Image (cartoon, grey):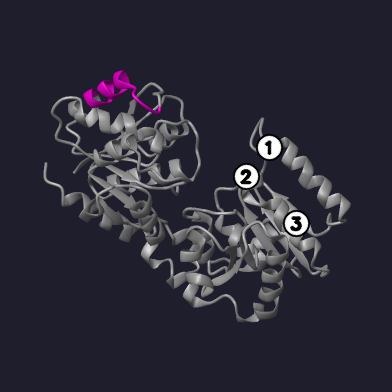
Amino acid sequence: MRIAYICGTKSWGGLEMNQAKNALWMQQKGHTVLAIGPENSSFQQFCTEHHIPFQRIEKHRKYYDFKASRKLREHLVKNKIEHLILRDVKDMSVSVAAKFWGKSSFKVHYFMEMQLGVSKKNILHTIRFRLLDSWSCPLNWLKEQVEQKTFMPKNRIVVIPSGLDRSPFIEFISQDEARNALMLPLNQLIIGLAGRFDRQKGQLLLLESISQIKNSAISILFLGEPTYNEGESYNTEIKQFIETNHLQERVFVRPFRKDIAVFYRAIDVFVMASKSESVGMVTLESLASNTPVIGSNAGGTIELLENGKLGFLFEPGNAESLAEAITHFCKTEKKWPNHELVQSTEKFDHHSVIEQVENHLSTFKN
């Protein structure tokens, strides 16, 4: 198949990474892949490093950018593209307009990453959504949300999980080796949280919870750092809380690293503290590492943890509830890790996911 992946932003978060990795995996399966995005973006850098053909486009408006849509269509037709895949809703308008600006044979597929907020049943959203050839949801709860909050035809809605290359997480090193690599104590129970320093990620919530647990043998490892020119005030608030509550000896901060599997191996339990994650890839990474998870009882975390079967759930944004979940984990800690954690991620294995994507796209005849 001849497939194009559009990514119109210069950001480099989970959404953009998933788009880039899926483009790479489909190319590795032998399909002709074209990446489309702005120049000097992280998406372009990834594609260049992995030898994925890249077509530069100018930044486009979220809605009604017909000039950009015509230009996009020209690239797609020139490269004889059969399928255009988008993940960012900001790319939806320009993508469907490109398809319907004259006669075009390529199909447009939206692979959902972010949950819907309010209802999207107004006429403009309905027209735009119905121009999509398919809408793929990574989890069942998101499929239900699309069915409830849009007029998207149900026969165009499918569930295809987010893909995860599990090999870095399954090939374990010992916990002592991981802790030595991160310069962490060997005799502590360590709770981990990975993500940029952002109020939505819940670092302060975890600190508030730990301050309620009077057990000096429990420590925290934050993997991340403030976004440049953003989040400094939140970072200052975190530092002040640590100092005020005398947690300096129990909190460790380490910068992002490519071999993130070392982080999951070093900790005893991972905390997904965000109020609601559509699909927490860090949750999947933790489970693939056989590291149990304590997560918010909201969003996709509920489905990933199978309603608490594979971990512990707490009330979103509630420090006391999180402290109770941590205490519960400590009491049952000798039972973890559980082989069911790794097994639960088999359906997210990227080999299986890419096969599902192939099968899905092959049902459309051009």
Task: Identify the secondary structure beneath mark 2.
Answer: loop
- Residue 282 vertical position relative to residue 128 in the rendered view, above or below: below
Q: CA distance from mark 1 to mark 3?
A: 17 Å
**Residue at (27, 21) in percent of width and height:** 71
First along the sequence among labels 2 and 3: 2
Instruction: Give the image location of residue 48, x and y in percent.
Output: 39, 33
Please, what is the three-letter code of the amino acid marked with disc 1? Gly
Please, what is the three-letter code of the amino acid marked with disc 3? Leu
Q: CA distance from mark 2 to mark 1?
A: 9 Å
Q: Nearer the viewer, mark 2 or mark 1?
A: 1
Q: Report the quarter where the C terminus lies.
A: top left
- Residue 228 vertical position relative to residue 180 in the rendered view, above or below: above
**In the figure, is residue 257 to the left or right of 119?**
right
Q: Which residues are magenta?
A: 62-74
The residue pinned by badge 2 equals 196
- Residue 258 vertical position relative to residue 316 in the rendered view, above or below: above
Q: Nearer the viewer, mark 2 or mark 3?
A: 3
Instruction: Give the image location of residue 237, x and y in percent.
Output: 78, 43
Q: Report the quarter where the N terminus lies.
A: top left
Q: Which mark is residue 207?
A: 3
Please, what is the three-letter code of the amino acid marked with disc 2? Arg
Q: Tell me the crowding category of disc 3: few under 14, some 14 to 19, or many 20 or more residues within 10 angstroms, Cα based.
A: many
The residue pinned by badge 1 equals 231
Q: CA distance from mark 2 to mark 3?
A: 15 Å
Instruction: Give the image location of residue 51, x and y in percent.
Output: 34, 36
- Would residue 323 be seen by someone viewing this image from the given angle? yes
266 or 134, nearer to the observer: 134
Asked whether residue 68 is drawn in magenta, I would say yes
| For the residues bearing labels 2 and 1, Cβ distance under 8 angstroms | yes
**In the figure, is residue 115 to the left or right of 80?**
right
Number of callouts: 3
